[in-house]
Image (spheres, helix red, strand yellow):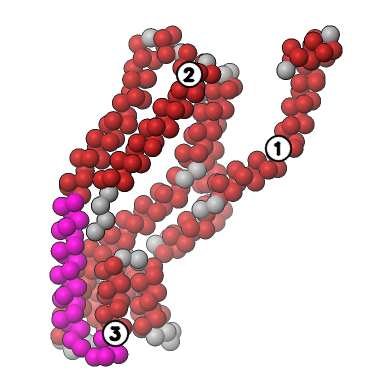
Amino acid sequence: MEKLIVKFFGLSWVSFPLVALSGAVLAYFLYTPLEKRFMKKAFGRKQDILQMLDQMFVSVEEKKINSMILLINFGPSIIFFLLLWPNITMGIIVSFIVWLAMSEVPYYYIKHQWEKRNNLLVTQMVDGLTIMSNGIKAGLSVPQSLERVAENLPNPIAQEFTLILSQTKVGRSLEDALIDFGERIPRPDVQMFVTAINILKETGGNLAETFSTIVTVIRERQKVEQKIQAMTTQGMMQGLIISLVPIGIILLLWIMDPTYIQPMFSTTLGIVLLLIVFGLIGVGGIMIKKIVTVKV
């Protein structure tokens, strides 16, 4: 750009303000659409995050969530850009890739914690339904049995059952409160529990025996899941190691002889090859995860 302006005007001193002015004009027209795109990408999952936090009984101010999203999204990108300075081209490319990767971290981290809580609740249902079954046999009603579970077991099942009881105390029907419970915890075992209570309350039946059957189903399902997890862990580790090998080789060459690997980071061809390599690593990791993931 500078050489073209110098050739056109014949004065090198004119090139500097013209380049600065053209950059300012370009930034002015691109700022608004880029800002909207970046903010949409960064905050696109905020409502999902807030909903999952609410379902986990975690009270957090929305301002703190916004600050966390901005910090995780743009903090590492800025750090990588400064580390690669004055190589602006490489810094922009690496920062953009880091931003794309980090933009999904808040959502998937909260989702992981939400899934972990749901799985723990399903595990607790074995003891919870056993307590409810014994309570029904002793002549207690369903709400009284739920109260016994909330008093004797820790969170998260105590939180969920306490919320169900609180809703019934303010006038909501037990059926509706249980349906909400099933929507908050989208697990087949929870749906089975909710459906069994709602149907048997209308048609009549042996709730204690039904709870014992559900406990047996949950235990058998957990055995199958644990067996599958043990079988697929080896495949996951192999995929992780294979994905990390190219990165390890690059780091090893950088430590042994930086000048040998430097063209990969300083030339256009090297940067393109790096993008292809990391893209293929990402695709390979996703395919391996899909292959070894078995849903029960």
Q: Residues within 10 Å of mark 2 (few under 14, many from 20)?
A: some
Q: Main secondary structure of the magenta part?
A: helix
| As drawn, 256 above or below 217 | above
Q: Is residue 169 visible?
A: no
Q: CA distance from mark 3 to mark 2?
A: 65 Å
| As drawn, 296 above or below 230 | below
- Residue 30, disc: 1
Label 2: element kind: helix
Label 1: element kind: helix
Q: Quadrant of residue 282?
A: top left
Q: Amino acid at mark 1?
A: Leu
Q: Residues within 10 Å of mark 3 (few under 14, many from 20)?
A: few
| As drawn, 126 above or below 171 | above
Label 3: element kind: helix
91 vs 114, left or right, is right
Q: Quadrant of residue 5?
A: top right
Q: CA distance from mark 1 to mark 3?
A: 59 Å
207 vs 175, left or right, is left
User: From which residue to which does the magenta span run?
Assistant: 199-228
Q: Quickly name the residue at label 3.
A: 199
Q: Amino acid at mark 2?
A: Gly
44 vs 201, left or right, is right
Q: Residue at x 17, y 69 (%)?
A: 217
Q: CA distance from mark 2 to mark 1?
A: 28 Å
- Residue 270, disc: 2
* Residue 61 image position (x, y, % from top left): 53, 57
Q: Of the residues under marks 2 and 1, which one precedes in the sequence? A: 1
Q: Nearer the viewer, mark 3 or mark 2?
A: 2
Question: Magenta stretch: residue 208 in it?
Answer: yes
186 or 50: nearer the eye? 186
- Residue 246, disc: none
